């Protein structure tokens, strides 16, 4: 009788996580019938923990040219860091941080990803910045007249809360935290921002409140 130790069975959490990634097009096993997940598959579970936990949505970029599968369009949102909490792309899939009640869609006409939430008669919209450059001047160039910059504030187990800032407010925030590479959390500890420009997004309101929001009233936080 063989005394070879048996491999631990694959946990249900691993199977469930890989099933989610497979359904969303982020995992394509070379040997679907293989029982045990490969080292590559387990690495995907770590890379896409935000997708599996429901803190990020996956949208498929549509190609603008005939025969294009959207790889080029998705790369506009890619980041050098493949880590949870930021917008990044894999092939023609774009991973966008989202929260409960938000819907993420890719607009073929504008080539943008829109994350929307209905609030009464208004629609709150967040869009990732495009392009690989995440310098302050390049971010500000992409803002419309009434646009704000949405900055994610990390709240531990509660996840992320977005604070919306005007261009001037964000420039001051950038000088304070981007150069230091940190930002304060609610408990006074410090949260490392490897690159602040990679995690911020554009925010605007579409609807009756848009005119009021364009004035000097207090900023709305989501």
Image: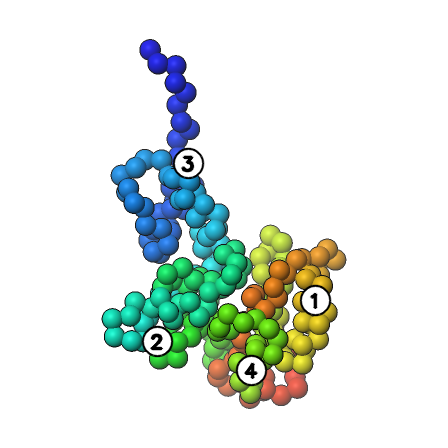
Q: Residue at x 41, y 44 (%)?
A: 40
Q: Residue at x 35, y 14 (%)?
A: 2
> Which marked residue is nearer to the observer: mark 2 or mark 4?
4
Looking at this view, is 119 or 134 the one in front? 134
Query: Relative to 5, does residue 39 appear above or below in the rendering?
Result: below
Which image quarter is the C terminus in?
A: bottom right
Q: Which residue, given by chain and number where applicable, does mark 1 sit on?
A: 179
| Res 141 label | 4
Cα separation, mark 1 vs mark 2, equals 36 Å
Q: Are the residues tagged 4 and 3 within 8 Å (C-beta)?
A: no
Question: Most extreme residue toward the left, as rendered?
Answer: 67
Query: Relative to 12, does residue 68 appear above or below in the rendering?
Result: below
Cα separation, mark 1 vs mark 3, equals 43 Å
Which image quarter is the N terminus in?
A: top left
Q: Which residue, given by chain and number where applicable, does mark 2 sit on?
A: 108
Q: Which residue, given by chain and number where applicable, does mark 3 sit on?
A: 11
């Amino acid at each position: 009788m063989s005394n070879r130790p048996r491999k631990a069975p694959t946990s249900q959490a691993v199977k469930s996580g890989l099933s989610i990634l497979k359904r969303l097009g982020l995992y394509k096993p070379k040997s679907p019938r293989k029982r045990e997940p490969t080292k590559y598959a387990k690495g995907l579970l770590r890379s896409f923990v935000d997708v599996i936990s429901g803190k990020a949505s996956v949208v498929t970029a549509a190609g603008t040219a005939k025969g294009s599968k959207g790889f080029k369009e998705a790369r506009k949102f890619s980041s050098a860091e493949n880590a949870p909490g930021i917008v990044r792309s894999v092939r023609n899939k774009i991973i966008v941080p989202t929260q409960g009640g938000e819907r993420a869609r890719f607009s073929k006409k504008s080539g943008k990803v829109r994350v929307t939430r209905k609030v009464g008669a208004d629609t709150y919209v967040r869009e990732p910045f495009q392009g690989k450059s995440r310098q302050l001047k390049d971010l500000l160039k992409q803002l419309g007249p009434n646009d704000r910059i949405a900055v994610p504030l990390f709240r531990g187990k509660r996840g992320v809360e977005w604070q919306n800032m005007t261009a001037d407010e964000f420039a001051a925030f950038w000088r304070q935290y981007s150069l230091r590479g940190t930002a304060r959390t609610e408990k006074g500890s410090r949260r490392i921002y490897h690159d602040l420009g990679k995690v911020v997004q554009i925010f605007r309101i579409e609807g009756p409140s848009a005119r009021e929001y364009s004035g000097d009233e207090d900023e709305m936080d989501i």
